[in-house]
Amino acid sequence: MQVGPSHLQQNRNAVCRSAPRLVLCMWIAGLASAAHVLAQTTTKLSAQQAEKWRATGGQATQSASTAAATPDDVPLEDYLALLAQISPAARDGAQAYLRAFAQRCGRPLTALELRKAIAQGSGDPVLMGMVSASHPSQLAQRDALLNQLSQRIRCDGQGQP
């Protein structure tokens, strides 16, 4: 099934109207998951720091304190579960983006990269398009839209407008 330019423009306009609300919800989910991971990471790092403290004879190490200041990555499954709570279409679109990125770029996208693609600016346009295409109202055109959008994924993590 061919998707015409006018349909893509309508789809883009629909995404532009609904994207800010969706991005805000996903950003809030990212903050909630980051706070949860930070709490878990701080607890884990405290035990690790104590072990390093004992192993180095009381000498503090810079790497442990740096790791405590910047939480690493939310597990991808946890982040996708948070997206599903916001909107099943958000999770489905993100999963389609993950599959397309891995196929096109030859490596998996990390949860941190996915979070950045969602949260930076208005979100990666390709990812936002995949979220919109995954909405139940787009069921008839979903596969064609997802295939077309997957061709626009750039391996540097930035979609094309």
Image (cartoon, rainbow, N blue to C red):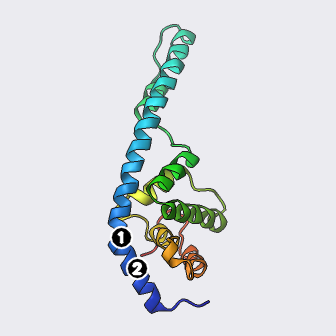
Quickly name the residue at label 1. 18
Q: Which mark is residue 12?
A: 2
Compared to residue 48, the image places residue 83 above or below, namely: below
Amino acid on which the number 1 mark rests in the picture: Ser
* Residue at point 52%, 7% (across, down): 57
Indicate the secondary structure of the residue bearing disc 1: helix
Indicate the secondary structure of the residue bearing disc 2: helix
Amino acid on which the number 2 mark rests in the picture: Arg
Compared to residue 78, the image places residue 24 above or below, namely: below
**Whole-number angstrom distance, CA of label 2 to CA of label 1:** 10 Å
Residue depth check, mark 2 versus mark 1: number of the one nearer the observer? 1
Front in this rendered view, residue 45 or 36: 36
In the image: residue 16, left or right of residue 76: left
Q: Position of residue 30 (x, y in %)?
A: 41, 48
Q: Which mark is residue 49?
A: none
Earlier in the chain: of badge 2 and badge 1, it is: 2
* Residue at point 56%, 43% (across, down): 75
Compared to residue 37, the image places residue 42 above or below, namely: above
The total of numbered circles placed on residues is 2
